[in-house]
Image (cartoon, helix red, strand yellow):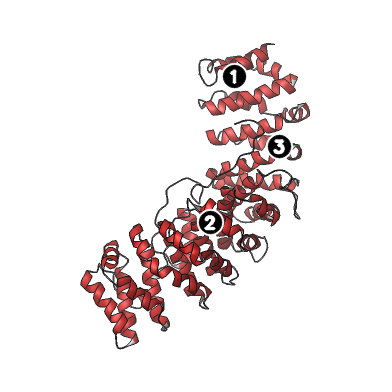
Amino acid sequence: MAVGDSMKRHGLGPAGSGCPCHTQPALLPPALRKARREQQLVSKRLLRDDAQEEARGGCVAEILGEAEVQQFLQLAQRGTEEKEREKALVSLRRGLQHPETQQTFIRLEGSMRTLVGLLTSNQALLQLEAARCLHELSHSEQSAVAEACLPATSYLLTYLSGHSSDFIELCLYTLGNLIVESEAVRRQLLPQGIVPALAACILSPHVAVLEALGYALSQLLQAKEAPEKIVPSILGSTLPQHMLRLLQPGPKLNLGVAVEFAWCLHYITCSQVNNALLITHGGLSTLGLLLLDLAGAVQRTEDAGLELLACPVLRCLSNLLTEPAEEAVGGPLQLGDERIVAALFILLQFFLQKQPGLLPEGLWFLNNLTANSPSFCTSLLSLDLIEPLLQLLPVSNVVSVMVLTVLCNIAEKGPAYCQRMWPGHLLPSLLNTLAFSDTEVVGQSLELLQLLFLYQPEATQAFLQQSGLQALERHQKEAQLQDRVHALRQTALQ
């Protein structure tokens, strides 16, 4: 990677690990955030209060055959008493926890039509149980099951404007699950008005609804067709302003809600459709202030899941900083403020102790801060942060490359910067990296040494005195490095 290049961070998995998505086991709604911390963000979520059902004397869910599915649907539709009808739907819902019953259900002619009819009934309990049946179906790993639910999507959207927050939450998670599984579902939801429906939900005062909304929206934004067909509609709505409002630091900030919408913003910035619009809405200043708040929070608490929010916030900031300089300025917080650099290093120390896997996220942001900004480089030097950076070199090859890239960004700014970064353990650390076997780490070390030789005369003499030429010898025959090794050797000897 060239010195001074800022880098865009593209969306992998929501947790940034690139790991495949997994189906989440049954969860009580309050446990969603805990599971998110333990298992990363997952592709589907299931709201199922098994503990409550057991307390009511519920039985273990059994696989249902075609005759039993048909019987329960008929009872639910034509039973003489509401309790009997509700009980039939409960039995059906339990059976739909099994993939075998799900397949039986979608093969049975008229089954979905009957379930949609119950979903639209004027009896609240039946309606709720029908929605729960759909939710079980939405959790299937088979796209055919999700597509069988297509007749219900318009009703699920309609119910997002209802009065029951629990029902809205259920509909949102169901829609989110269906969005994950099938492009056909997404293709139908867009003209049905899912974006305006979600934009209306974001005004809800209920935290559970907002978390569910963030989940559904993030699934929509991760679709492969999102940059062309989905992101423009979302940017044209009121959603971005309200997402940023929900990320403003303060007593009203809810961690679970903030995590969901920070990931949504991350997927939007990765699409590169119109990041300038997010900056115009105050994206840089809001996320910058949130970063300061997170740095303060990690100093006050041992472990509150803050790393879940720090990761997408850092990614969003990194991507927004790749916009043209004239667009990346403004708002109440100027990102040239030294506080941003200090806050970032507090988070880097937190990651080092608690979540080393997140160090590249912070270093990616630091690279984009220093790539084209002498003022950020000055801040880093003024705060004596070269030594803390060097301490990160042994963590991993990926971290080493990014640390060295940031140091190259500083050295590239000229003699005054090299002079300020020279005292201390810089040269011994670089000589240590030359012993690495990773060619990218060694290559970045060679680039930094070349800049130091150019701008800091003491560096060449010290390099020779500390057996630098011997350290270069092991890389002379490596095809990817030999030209740079030869060039650095010639510079040192001259």
**In terms of depth relative to the viewer, which is nearer, 220 or 100?**
220
Task: Examine the rendered structure and indicate whether residue 368 appears above or below residue 195.
Answer: above
The residue type indicated by label 2 comes to Ile
Badge 3 density bin: few <14, some 14–19, many ≥20, Cα 10 Å: many
Badge 2 density bin: few <14, some 14–19, many ≥20, Cα 10 Å: some
The residue that label 1 is drawn on is: 484
Q: Quadrant of the C terminus?
A: top right
Q: Is residue 242 left or right of residue 18?
A: right
The residue type indicated by label 3 comes to Asn
Mark 2 element type: loop
Is there any visible trace of residue 287 in the rendered image? Answer: no
Percent coordinates x, y for residue 49 in the rendering? 40, 70
Mark 1 element type: helix
Which numbered dot is residue 201? Answer: none
Percent coordinates x, y for residue 211 in the rendering? 53, 64
Which numbered dot is residue 372? Answer: 3
Q: Is residue 139 left or right of residue 168?
A: left
Q: Quadrant of the N terminus?
A: top right
Q: CA distance from mark 1 to mark 3?
A: 24 Å
- At 67% from the left and 60% from the top, the residue drawn is 249
Task: Examine the rendered structure and indicate whether residue 107 appears above or below residue 469.
Answer: below
**In terms of depth relative to the viewer, which is nearer, 79 or 418?**
79
Badge 1 density bin: few <14, some 14–19, many ≥20, Cα 10 Å: some
The residue type indicated by label 1 comes to Arg
1 or 2: mark nearer the eye: 2
Which numbered dot is residue 230? Answer: 2
Q: Which badge, 1 or 2, is on the more N-terminal residue?
A: 2
Percent coordinates x, y for residue 360 in the rendering? 57, 41
Task: Examine the rendered structure and indicate whether residue 60 appears above or below residue 390.
Answer: below
| Residue farthest along the right direction in this orientation | 416
Circles 2 and 3: CB atoms closer than 8 Å:
no
- At 55% from the left and 54% from the top, the residue drawn is 308
